[in-house]
């Protein structure tokens, strides 16, 4: 799992596309909601739904200034698409989800949300 210092460094390199500035706060709030859904899907073993949600992050996070969320989404998608059954895979996905939570907290600070 990335440390807060590592996450902070990643965040400093992230920029949103200027025309999306009015939508960044809404995007952030939606991702916080997504995170709760993702946790529920993982807990229930709904790997297809977890994979879809993570895939969406991978696809649209960068233009809003959330590039690392897209990277985390890609990692979560990969593990979820393999229907993780080993404890190691489950631990990895839980660590990634925890990192998403920490990342979003730091993004909230960055954008004063």
Image (cartoon, grey):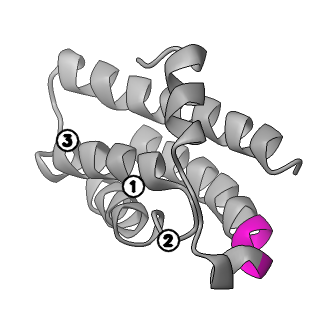
Quarter occupied by the N terminus: top left
Q: Report helix, strand or loop for mark 2.
A: loop
- Residue furthest to the left: 82
Q: Report helix, strand or loop for mark 1.
A: helix
Q: Which residue is mark 1?
A: 70
Residue 73 vertical placement versus 27 (above, below): above
Q: Is residue 48 left or right of residue 2?
A: left
Give me the disc on residue 79. Answer: 3
- Which residue is drawn at the image coordinates 53% and 28% (left, top)? 9
Q: Which residue is mark 2?
A: 63
Give me the disc on residue 57. Answer: none
Mark 2, other Cα within 10 Å: few <14 / some 14–19 / many ≥20: some
Residue 17 sits in quarter: bottom right
Mark 1, other Cα within 10 Å: few <14 / some 14–19 / many ≥20: many
Q: Position of residue 57 (x, y in %)?
A: 42, 62
Query: Which is more toward the observer, 5 or 103?
Result: 5
Real-space Cα distance between discs 2 and 3?
24 Å
Determine if the magenta segment contains residue 23.
yes
Query: Which is more toward the observer, 29 or 109?
Result: 109
- Which residue is drawn at the image coordinates 19% and 41% (left, top)? 79
How many marks are shown on the rendered structure? Answer: 3
Q: Position of residue 64 (x, y in %)?
A: 58, 68
Q: Earlier in the sequence, mark 3 or mark 1?
A: 1
Q: Is residue 33 left or right of residue 110?
A: left
- Which residue is drawn at the image coordinates 18% and 36% (left, top)? 84
Q: Position of residue 70 (x, y in %)?
A: 39, 55
Q: Contact (CB < 8 A) between labels 3 and 1?
A: no
Residue 84 vertical placement versus 82 (above, below): above
Q: Earlier in the sequence, mark 2 or mark 1?
A: 2
Q: Which residues are magenta?
A: 22-26
- Residue furthest to the bottom: 19
């Amino acid at each position: 799992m990335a440390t807060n210092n590592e996450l902070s460094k990643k965040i400093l390199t992230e920029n949103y596309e200027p025309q999306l500035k009015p939508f960044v706060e809404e995007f952030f709030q939606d991702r916080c909601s997504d995170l709760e859904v993702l946790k529920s899907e993982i807990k229930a073993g709904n790997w297809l739904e977890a994979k879809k949600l993570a895939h969406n992050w991978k696809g649209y996070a960068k233009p809003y200034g959330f590039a690392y969320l897209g990277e985390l989404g890609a990692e979560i998608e990969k593990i979820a698409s393999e229907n993780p059954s080993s404890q190691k895979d489950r631990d990895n996905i839980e660590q990634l989800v925890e990192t998403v939570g920490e990342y979003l907290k730091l993004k909230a600070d960055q954008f004063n949300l």
